[in-house]
Image (spheres, rainbow, N blue to C red):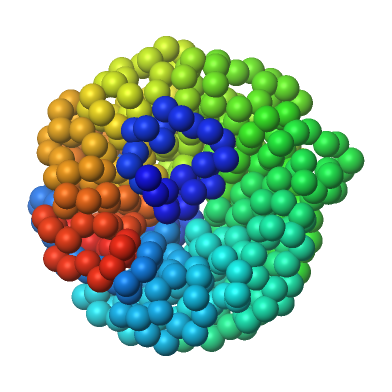
Amino acid sequence: MRFYFKKLVIQSCLAFSVFFLSCSKDDGVGDTTENDIEEAETPTPGFKGEIVWNKTFGGSLNDFGSSIAQTNDGGLALFGYSESQDGELIGKSRPGNDYWVLKLDNEGTVQWSKTYGGSGDDIGTNMIQTNDGGYLLGGYSMSSDGDASKNEGFHDNWFVKLDASGAIEWEKSYGFSGHDHSYSLIQTKDGGYFSAGFLDVTASGGAGNETITRHGIGEFWGQKFDSEGELEWRRYYGGTNNDRAYKVLQAKDGGFMMFGLTESDDFDIKETHGSYEFWVVKIDEGGEMLWEKTFGGSGIEQAYDAVAVKDGGFVIVGQGYSNDGDATGNHGSSDAWAIKIDEKGRLLWQKMLGGSNFELAQGIAMAKDGSFFITGNSRSADGDVLTNKGENDFMVMQLSNDGDLLWEKTYGGSGIDLAQSISVSTEEKVTFIGSTESNDGDVEFNKGLNDLWVLQIR
């Protein structure tokens, strides 16, 4: 059984046995403006979910897509990691996983493809286009050679700044002796950057914070950088168990919202419902915690992505096993779980989405009409999910601003197809990215084991 997609690779050490049995395996980063958001109660006019184009990229080994961004020239940038050295990776000089960026035009044609890394394992998780037209890449690395200048331990956060053509402008590595991971990046209002992720605080011995507080196994880790990647401050938040931040957004007041999961019920976590829960942390511009909230039931809930909405609130997506507490309407096993909170963290609505088998929401993007497109993967063919082509399929759902399901469709073949990230263009074309093992169904061609797979629909 293989688990190659970014969040579940990380979570393998969390021993989610129920989850693993169920799965055979930005979008920008919340830069939605108020003018982009209107009320939505019906599907986007003319939207049918028809495939505009459908492409696989990779070589004979494993190649994964983690993140997608609309670019300012009307094209797309894809980000992930690859261990292949043939196919689209013919120029890759090192074995093992490297960061991988593909720049596409608006028809899905490759304009350039480049890899970045060293002799260690380099796993790319998140990419943004920066204000200067370049890109910032984030993830975690074991390398201290090649493109990476240093490594402090096992995995370090590794950030690579590119110009518009993919040339490296600077790279920075931050970490300690254990597993330290960056999962989400934003460019901040002052022109710098913020990373949210995971600090192996046990291995760091409590280092990684500007305070002396030491909690437990792993923490939400926030790091603020200037425009050249120099560290300005860092703080961690959590309790004595596993706490992981998978998404960060900058709030209207200049502070930061961090979204992820917590297994803890002490220190920074004041109230819990059961096992793993959605955890939302609001901090000010200097990293001081202003408030925190947990959402869930007696089972496992995990948040992976979020978007800001016009009224100041946030819609958060992930997975949920519970049918009690904050989570009601579970269809069986894991459902995709979407919740909306207001600017103070009060729950406004929640929606369990799925069938009797297994669903997981990995990404969310806002459409111009105020509706939300959610992507993830599904194994069901009942309930909210009408079809399954075999194993895990890419799943796309459209929700109204009140959380009502407007439309859904799955894409895939007979193998394992896992979607990671989603983006909506100004022309209301929806593009989503992940990986595929299939070579049939909607997958026109597979070059090896896992290929990076990207689809655009309208």
Does the image show residue 75? no
Percent coordinates x, y for residue 269 in the rendering:
68, 25
Nearer the observer, 318 or 82:
82
Q: Quadrant of the N terminus?
A: top left
Does the image show residue 55? yes
- Residue at 67% from the left image edge and 78% from the top image edge: 145
| Depicted 326 relative to depicted 142: above or below | above
- Residue at 33% from the left image edge and 29% from the top image edge: 335
Residue 162 appears left or right of 335? right
| Depicted 36 relative to depicted 359: above or below | below
Q: Quadrant of the C terminus?
A: bottom left
Image quadrant in which you'd find residue 316: top left
Q: How many circles with numbers are drawn on the protein?
A: 0
- Residue at 49% from the left image edge and 32% from the top image edge: 16
Percent coordinates x, y for residue 17 in the rendering:
46, 30
Nearer the observer, 159 or 216:
216
